[in-house]
């Protein structure tokens, strides 16, 4: 991917616009991938803003420059939120869950087979199960198949009840890989998990089971957020923000290349200019504060979201695996008193009290079967039944 020459980059203040322009955004296409890309960029910009707020130990003049950079990023985040607000809450919930599956699969498929890819493969069935649960929640209210365009299979992954793990087991190991995509991937997935956490905690549902399901999903997303955040490279704070801004540039350019709507494409291309200007400013700040010169990025090919049914099916072989500290192990290999089992007894003492299970039980009780879209029988025989919610897998 080519970078844009420095002389063409705007000044930081050009990223701050009049109030009436912040909400002046194009209409978002109804295509599932266009909508997912909007969420991806919204999540990533918000993560950059949060990253910059954590940088405190720099001289006042540098903190002022950082404040200007952050204000421009906030403007970008607000404009992107105007895109995502074009979706109803149920639509946004399903599209966001769809995004988690597709971006995790897209990143994992391109990574070398090292610990980072293994972590993504492990968590992919959990993202899929959330799509499945929310499709069962909103079928009838929405045309789920039309919304997701048939791009993804809707079927059980690792049952959500089995996704609740002890906090000690939600910690990864910082990636030591030096290729750009391995360094960027944990930031991308941290950002998406944080965005989904916010969405679930702010959800408004009158249905008690669905409101409880949002809270259960928020707990799972915080767990994912912690896991992905600890996979990020171990870097000084300004270098970490530079990596975030470079990742954001990469995402804006990737999404612009994939977007067919010319108005949305132009919006993303313009935002990419601003994020490159932010990266240039951060490089200057790093040179002044610690005398180092960050190495130029060897940009990977654009990250394109596309159907990943085969990859997701292959990842389902991990549904019987859980995390134990920083290792992945079969649940059946854990000793009886393992932290996983103790935590399960505390958080999920009775299946009928777990919202993700209660939702499926209600759906099956009302219609006789769950809602699915499969192109072939489920690869895990124990998860093929459409008349019961299997809760023994993975726990």
Image (cartoon, rainbow, N blue to C red):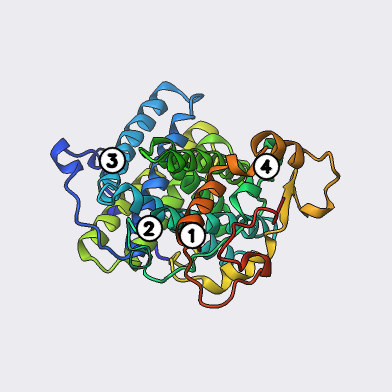
* Measured Cα–Cα span from mark 3 to mark 2: 17 Å
- The residue mark sitting in front, 2 or 4, is 4
Q: Are marks 1 and 2 in contact (CB under 8 Å)?
A: yes
Q: Are marks 3 and 4 in contact (CB under 8 Å)?
A: no
Give the residue displayed 66% in from the left and 46% down from the top.
174
- The residue mark sitting in front, 3 or 2, is 2
Give the residue displayed 53% in from the left and 64% down from the top.
155
- Label 2, secondary structure: give it: helix
Please tell me the numbered disc located at residue 165: 4
Q: Are marks 3 and 2 in contact (CB under 8 Å)?
A: no
- Label 1, secondary structure: give it: helix
Q: Are marks 4 and 1 in contact (CB under 8 Å)?
A: no
Packing grade of label 4 (10 A; few <14, some 14-19, many >=20) is many
N-terminal of the pair, mark 1 or mark 2, is 2
Closest to the observer, 316 or 210:
210
- Label 4, secondary structure: give it: loop
Q: Circle 2 is placed at which residue position? A: 36
Q: Quadrant of residue 164?
A: top right
- The residue mark sitting in front, 3 or 4, is 4
N-terminal of the pair, mark 3 or mark 4, is 3
The image position of residue 239, as x and y in percent, is 53, 41
* Measured Cα–Cα span from mark 1 to mark 2: 9 Å
Q: Circle 1 is placed at which residue position? A: 103
Q: Quadrant of residue 2?
A: bottom left
* Measured Cα–Cα span from mark 4 to mark 1: 23 Å
Closest to the observer, 139 or 32:
139
Packing grade of label 1 (10 A; few <14, some 14-19, many >=20) is many
């Amino acid at each position: 991917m080519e970078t844009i020459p420095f002389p063409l980059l705007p000044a930081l203040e050009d990223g701050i616009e009049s109030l009436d322009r912040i909400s002046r955004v194009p209409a978002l296409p109804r295509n599932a991938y266009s909508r997912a890309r909007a969420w991806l960029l919204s999540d990533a910009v918000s993560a950059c803003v949060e990253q910059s707020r954590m940088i405190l130990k720099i001289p006042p003049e540098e903190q002022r420059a950082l404040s200007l950079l952050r204000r421009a990023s906030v403007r970008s985040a607000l404009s992107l939120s105007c895109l995502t607000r074009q979706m109803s809450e149920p639509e946004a919930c399903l599209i966001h869950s769809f995004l988690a599956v597709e971006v995790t699969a897209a990143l994992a498929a391109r990574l070398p087979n090292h610990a980072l890819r293994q972590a993504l493969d492990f968590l992919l069935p959990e993202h899929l199960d959330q799509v499945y649960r929310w499709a069962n929640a909103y079928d009838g209210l929405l045309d789920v198949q039309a919304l997701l365009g048939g791009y993804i299979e809707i079927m059980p992954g690792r049952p959500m009840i089995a996704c609740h793990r002890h906090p000690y087991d939600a910690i990864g190991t910082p990636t030591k890989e030096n290729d750009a995509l391995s360094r960027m991937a944990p930031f991308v997935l941290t950002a998406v998990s944080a965005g989904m956490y916010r969405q679930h905690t702010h959800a408004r549902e009158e249905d008690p089971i669905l409101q409880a399901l949002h809270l259960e999903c928020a707990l799972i997303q915080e767990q994912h957020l912690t896991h992905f955040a600890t996979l990020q490279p171990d870097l000084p704070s300004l270098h970490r923000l530079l990596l975030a801004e470079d990742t954001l540039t990469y995402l804006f350019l990737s999404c612009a290349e994939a977007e067919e709507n010319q108005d949305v494409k132009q919006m993303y291309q313009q935002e990419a200019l601003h994020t490159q200007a932010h990266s240039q400013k951060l490089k200057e700040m790093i040179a002044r504060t610690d005398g180092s010169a960050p190495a130029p990025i060897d940009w990977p090919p654009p990250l394109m979201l596309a159907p990943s049914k085969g990859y997701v099916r292959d990842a389902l072989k991990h549904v019987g695996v859980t995390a134990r500290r920083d290792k992945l192990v079969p649940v059946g290999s854990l000793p009886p008193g393992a932290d996983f089992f103790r935590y399960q007894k505390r958080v999920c003492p009775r299946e009928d009290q777990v919202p993700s299970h209660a939702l499926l039980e209600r759906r099956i009780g009302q219609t006789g079967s769950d809602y699915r879209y499969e192109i072939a029988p489920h690869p895990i025989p124990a998860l093929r039944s459409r008349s019961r919610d299997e809760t023994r897998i993975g726990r």
